[in-house]
Image (spheres, rainbow, N blue to C red):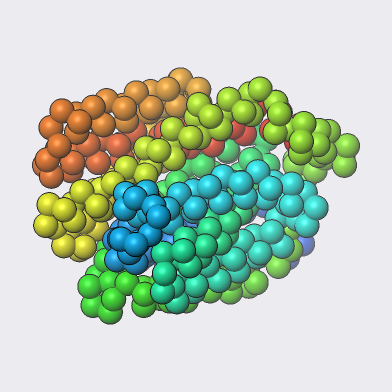
């Protein structure tokens, strides 16, 4: 974890040095530098968000009261369901807001909502309040994710897009790794609620970086388009396009379900097997490390060789196969093995998912 943190810091400092070498008038027209900055943003955002990833279902279980009208299994899943639902809805709306307000203002809004949601989670005294707070967290994270991806989607060159998505994936999962382990240690030391406050404090660092490094929207000459090209179809028409609907039903929804296995089912199952929160975090780390270190390599080899669509199918089949293994043999040992397999699949599956969406004609028209 210490190595990951120092690696990201050194990588970030190298990018800053590169920026200082550029003529001032060129700062806003360097797409390569701009793509590289998404890695540090993603690292800190996902580190802050994943401080709490392991403890969310456990905290929901603690806040649940048998007098509730909801069954326990549904009630425990409610906060994560609210977050996932909010991320999906905000993913739609954020794209439209980016067009109206610009990427920077939308990004700042998403970060602020994320901070507010995390703070409310820490203050939650009931499952209902916790679910609402997680809804706000989901809106913030969904908006942040759209803004980070929009930096990369703007690139015209597919090779540059692949590089950008692999950097974004590496930053995302490096942040996830650090967040999970640090969060579980803090949770055992200080309690669940305080971890949310610490997470909100770390998220504030992203806000400071945005104000310092990202003072206005960066637009490269190659991505400048006319207003007519930018908004050739409206939001309602975009949402009713068959390929867009198909993407969210047959690609994005299964991905969210697969991800919920790692961040929802895994902590509950491992907790029932008597594992501590730190040990649960270490198992989750297996998934994150595989994704983080293999993403740049496998994205370049698999996605560039087979294309986004076939790569996405390959990743889905590998993930589904790993879940069947656990279904046949539901033990802690098999859990560790399939988490590793899912990490390998996700290392190129997530960039392929993003690239496939960005390549849709409807997305480019929107």
The one nearer the camera, 291 or 77, is: 77
Image quadrant in which the N terminus is located: bottom left
* Residue 17 position by quadrant: bottom right
Residue at 77%, 31% (x, y): give it: 237
Give percent across and percent down for residue 80. 42, 53
Give percent across and percent down for residue 4. 33, 60
Q: Is residue 356 above or below residue 1?
A: above
Q: Is residue 171 above or below residue 120?
A: above
Residue at 41%, 34% (x, y): give it: 348
Residue at 20%, 48% (x, y): give it: 269
Give percent across and percent down for residue 150. 64, 46
Image quadrant in which the C terminus is located: top right
The one nearer the camera, 173 or 11, is: 173
Tell me if residue 116 can be seen.
yes
Q: Is residue 117 above or below residue 169?
A: below
Tell me if residue 364 can be seen.
no
The one nearer the camera, 12 or 312, is: 312
Give percent across and percent down for residue 187. 28, 72
Residue at 45%, 69% (x, y): give it: 121
203 sits to left or right of 245: left
Number of numbered labels in the structure image: 0
Q: Is residue 164 above or below residue 214?
A: above
């Amino acid at each position: 974890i210490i190595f990951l943190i120092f690696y990201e810091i050194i990588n970030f400092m190298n990018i800053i040095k590169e920026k200082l070498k550029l003529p001032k008038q060129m700062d806003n027209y360097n797409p390569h530098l701009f793509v590289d900055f998404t890695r540090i943003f993603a690292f800190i955002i996902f580190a802050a968000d994943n401080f709490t990833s392991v403890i969310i279902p456990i905290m929901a279980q603690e806040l649940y009261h048998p007098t509730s009208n909801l069954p326990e299994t549904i009630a425990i899943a409610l906060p994560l369901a609210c977050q996932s639902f909010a991320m999906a809805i905000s993913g739609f709306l954020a794209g439209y807001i980016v067009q109206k307000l610009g990427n920077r203002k939308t990004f700042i809004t998403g970060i602020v909502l994320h901070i507010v949601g995390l703070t409310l989670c820490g203050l939650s005294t009931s499952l209902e309040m916790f679910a609402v707070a997680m809804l706000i967290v989901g809106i913030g994270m969904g908006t942040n994710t759209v803004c980070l991806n929009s930096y990369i989607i703007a690139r015209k060159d597919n090779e540059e897009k692949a590089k950008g998505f692999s950097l974004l994936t590496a930053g995302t999962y490096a942040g996830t790794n650090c967040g999970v382990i640090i969060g579980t240690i803090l949770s055992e030391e200080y309690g669940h609620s305080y971890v949310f406050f610490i997470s909100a404090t770390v998220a504030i660092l992203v806000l400071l970086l945005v104000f310092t490094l990202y003072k206005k929207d960066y637009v490269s000459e190659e991505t400048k388009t006319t207003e007519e090209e930018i908004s050739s179809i409206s939001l309602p028409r975009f949402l009713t396009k068959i390929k867009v609907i198909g993407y969210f039903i047959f690609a994005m929804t299964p991905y969210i379900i697969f991800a919920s296995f790692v961040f929802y089912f895994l902590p509950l199952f491992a907790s029932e097997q008597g594992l501590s929160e730190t040990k649960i975090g270490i198992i989750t780390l297996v998934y994150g490390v595989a994704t983080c270190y293999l993403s740049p390599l496998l994205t370049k080899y698999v996605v560039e060789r087979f294309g986004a669509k076939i790569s996405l199918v390959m990743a889905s089949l590998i993930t589904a196969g790993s879940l069947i293994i656990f279904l046949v043999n539901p033990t802690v040992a098999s859990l560790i093995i399939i988490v590793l397999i899912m990490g390998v699949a996700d290392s190129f599956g997530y960039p392929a998912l993003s690239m496939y969406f960005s390549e849709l004609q409807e997305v480019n028209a929107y």
